[in-house]
Structure formats: C-alpha cells, structure tokens
Amino acid sequence: MSTEPEPSQRSGRSPLQRFSAGQWAQQKPTYRDADPALIGAVLRWSQLQPSGNWYVFAASRSIRRDRPYGTTVGGVEIVAWRDGDNTLHVGPGACPHLGADLATARVDDATLICRWHGMRVGANGSTRWCPFPSHDDGVLAWVRLDALGEQTPTDAPILGARPADCTVHAVTRLIGVCEPADIIANRLDPWHGAWFHPYSFARLHVTRTPPRTGITADNHRFVLAVTFRVARGLGAPVEAEFTSPDPRTIVMRIVSGEGVGSVVETHATPLGPGHDGLPRTAVVEAVVADSERPGFRYARRATPLLRPLMNYAMRRLWRDDLAYAERRYHLRRSKSSTRPPQSHS
C-alpha cells in the first residue's frame, strides 16, 4: 500500500512532486465508476437550478471602449461596449431603424452611432431600443435576457466562490455543435480526466460523489484527488471539488494542495442554431489562480505573459472535450430521430 501523503499534507512543501508516470494503458479503468445513471441524475438536478436569466457571453477584457462587441445568445443578437467610465452596456444587436448590425457602429461614450444612417442608441434606451441588464464581474461579461431565460430575474448572476484577488486569470471561448447540457454533462464526468487528457492529469481518483436520489445544494459535489502534470513524472497534486451554481455553469475549485481557492469556471451559453439548423453552444471558461506562497506576487505581475499560456492549456483541453460533448449530442439526436412515433389513438 502506498504511504505517499495526501495533497492536503503536502501544501507546505514544494508545489511540485515527482510521481511514477506509468503507462496510459495500465491505468485502472474508470468506466464502472462513471455511472451514466449518476451523471444523468446530477445533470437533471443542475438543470433545475435558478439562473436569474443571466448568460455569460465574453471575457470582461474583450469588451472595449473603442469598438462594439457583437454576438448572439439563444438566437438573440446582442451588442456590448464600454463608455468613458468603463461601464459595460449591452443591448439588442440590430438598429431599430432598418436593422443594421450595431456591432459595426461607432462608440460615442454611452451611445452607439449606427453607420448606416447615424441613428443613436444607448444606455438610456428609447421606445424602439431598450438596453438589457448587464453585469461585469471583472473576469466575465454577462447579459440578462428575461424573455429567453423565463425564470425569476435576479439583480446579478449567481456566482460560485472566487479568490479575493482575481488578478491572475484567463478566459477562453470556443464554440461547439451541441447544447449547453452536453457541456455540463462533460464536466459532471470527472472520471474521464486521466484517460482523455493524459497530457494534463494523472493519478485521478474520485473520492466523493453525489447520491443518485435526494440531490441537494449541500450534497451535489464531486470531489477528486488529482495531479496536474507539469512535465513527465512531475506534477502538482491537489484535491478539487466540482459544483454547479446554476444550470449552465460548473465550477472546479481547489480545496487542498497548491493554489487553494483557485477556480476553473466552465460556462455553457446557447448561441442558437447554425446555418445547418443544429444548435451551437459557446464554452466560456475562466481560470482564476491564487496562492498563499509569497512568490505568487511575481505571477500577478507577469499575468500578461502567463495569460497566453493559460489560454493554450484551456483550448487544448476543450479541443478534446468539445468532441466529447458534440458526440454526446450526436448520439442523443440520432436516438431521438430513430425513435418510432407515439400513437395518439
């Protein structure tokens, strides 16, 4: 039996530990633990949680003062920009005059000037163009769409815990042919980590799972011990929990080991159908890193240099995980299309 200390016992030593990398094919299979019924039960519970009708649509730093940012959320065109005080504004993406794309407009403080005919729309709204409630948490930009969400609105998004200092963070955004629930289901399967992402994870053991029935906000966590690979045979062992604060978000938080309190937030935002009629979902993932080590202050200063590396790591993982989510959607869609029609007699 191994006498290696648990991650919580190592936090006072070097964050990097040597381990026997082993062979990928010699890992202990996890398919018996990755119970589809359990994953399905937690997914159904997560989809019943309130969202306040809030949707992540971009990284906070992607919204600028010199030009608008346009996208769609659930088939709704939106446009976002910042005024001279750096306040975020979001509204409908079409000009109320003749429908011009306001993502091509000019920014004039809290006003957008349409390039087609010079019509002004802005933060004060009008009878023909009304801004949407928006929220900037310093990492992500959010919009509230009550007609789309159809839930009781809240004044702000329902966020999980984050480090007090969010200076060291990175956000990446990718688009997949699937639905938000497929992204969330991927994150509710922690067992695939060391098999599907051996370049990032090793020695992954799920130590706590939710129950199949009677799932609540208090018992819906997954907890796992995992080593984040830095190089072959060298990694940072931690303990992490996965929680779901709203139907379209999974938060992984380090609870012991190096970087306690650091989080990875995975947000799944519906965009609407593509040209092929199939749904598109944006994965907006934010990593917020923190550490109690004195040397971490250098990481804060080097954030502009670290951010591309963090984005590279996230995009590499999601290149694989989008294939997982898209495959899940494809199988569900194929099963639905081959199901015999129900008799209504």
Image (tube, rainbow, N blue to C red):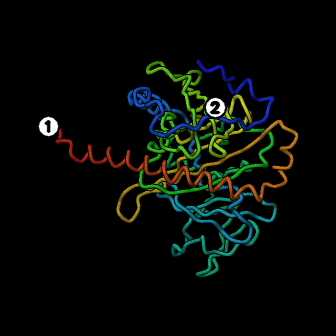
Amino acid tagged 2: Ala
| C-alpha span from label 2 to label 1 | 48 Å
Q: Quadrant of residue 278?
A: bottom left
Q: Residue at x 42, y 55 (%)?
A: 177
> Does residue 221 lie above or below 77 as drawn?
above
From the viewer's perspective, is 117 left or right of 7?
Answer: left
**Residue count near mark 2 (Cα–Cα under 10 Å), binned few <14, some 14–19, many ≥20:** many
From the viewer's side, name the closer residue of 222 and 30: 30
User: What residue would you read off at disc 2?
Assistant: 240
Amino acid tagged 1: Ser
Q: Residue at x 50, y 58 (%)?
A: 76
How many numbered marks have been drawn onto this rendered protein structure? 2
From the viewer's side, name the closer residue of 269 and 173: 173
From the viewer's perspective, is 80 left or right of 49?
Answer: right
**Residue count near mark 1 (Cα–Cα under 10 Å), binned few <14, some 14–19, many ≥20:** few
**Percent position (x, y) of residue 163?**
76, 38
**Percent position (x, y) of residue 272?**
44, 56
Mark number for residue 343?
1
Classify the position of the N terminus by image quarter: top right
Classify the position of the C terminus by image quarter: top left
